[in-house]
Amino acid sequence: MKQVLQAYWRRLRASDGSSTVEFVIWFPLFMTLFLTSFELSFYGMRSMMLERALDLNVRDLRLGISRPANLADLKKAICQDTILFRNCEEEISVDLRLVDQGSWSLPTGPIPCVDRAENIKPLTSYSPGGGGDLMLVRACLIRDPFFATTPYVMGLPRDPSGGVSIVAVSTFVNEP
């Protein structure tokens, strides 16, 4: 019995395979940190590209350089200024509306995004307004993350299809 216990204690004291245990514990943690930082960087780049495209088109709207005839033309103009999004015109949702300067009532609720799971386009408005009008433009684009666990790790809201929303909002006053 004593020999069995000594063999057992000797086996517990042995350090064979101890680095494997450390690797198994720490490697997933560091890989998750690395992959999440990559995903967050790419999400930020996508968000910045949508903001930039919206700002370029808002400037044209504000100054009266271009007046898209309808919402589809505005979507096309925004998507031409982004370089990272495939199927942008089908998946972007743009809402351009007049803000009442008497009551300052802004739209409540989330920005309407395309529901890819049901293939439903949200109801949005397109009213370019006149000179001196305060306008609000909101754009939403749903994109799939590179790694399925990223929205959970970063706390991003997901849509039913598993994508995360990239949102850009801007206000401007039309030049008279």
Image: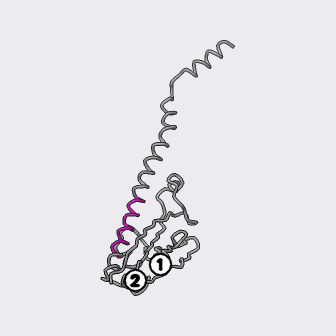
Task: Identify the amino acid type marked 2.
Answer: Asp
Q: Position of residue 68 (x, y in %)?
A: 38, 84
Q: How many marks?
A: 2
- Quarter of the figure with the N terminus: top right
**Residue at coordinates 64% horizontally, 13% vertically from top-left?**
3
User: For residue 40, what is the image quadrant?
Assistant: bottom left
State the mark number for residue 93. none
* Residue 64 in the figure: left or right of residue 139: left
Residue toward you, 111 or 101: 101
Q: Which residue is mark 1?
A: 102
In the rendered structure, the answer to whether residue 1 lies left or right of residue 169 reads right
Q: Is residue 16 above or below residue 77?
A: above
Residue 66 drawn above or below residue 144: below
Outermost residue on the front side: it is 102
The rendered magenta stretch, by its main secondary structure, is classed as: helix
Q: Which residues are magenta?
A: 42-57
What residue is drawn where x is 48% and y is 36%? 23
Amino acid at the residue labelled 1 = Gly
Q: Secondary structure at mark 2?
A: helix
Residue 87 coordinates in the image, percent (x, y):
44, 73
Label 1 element class: loop
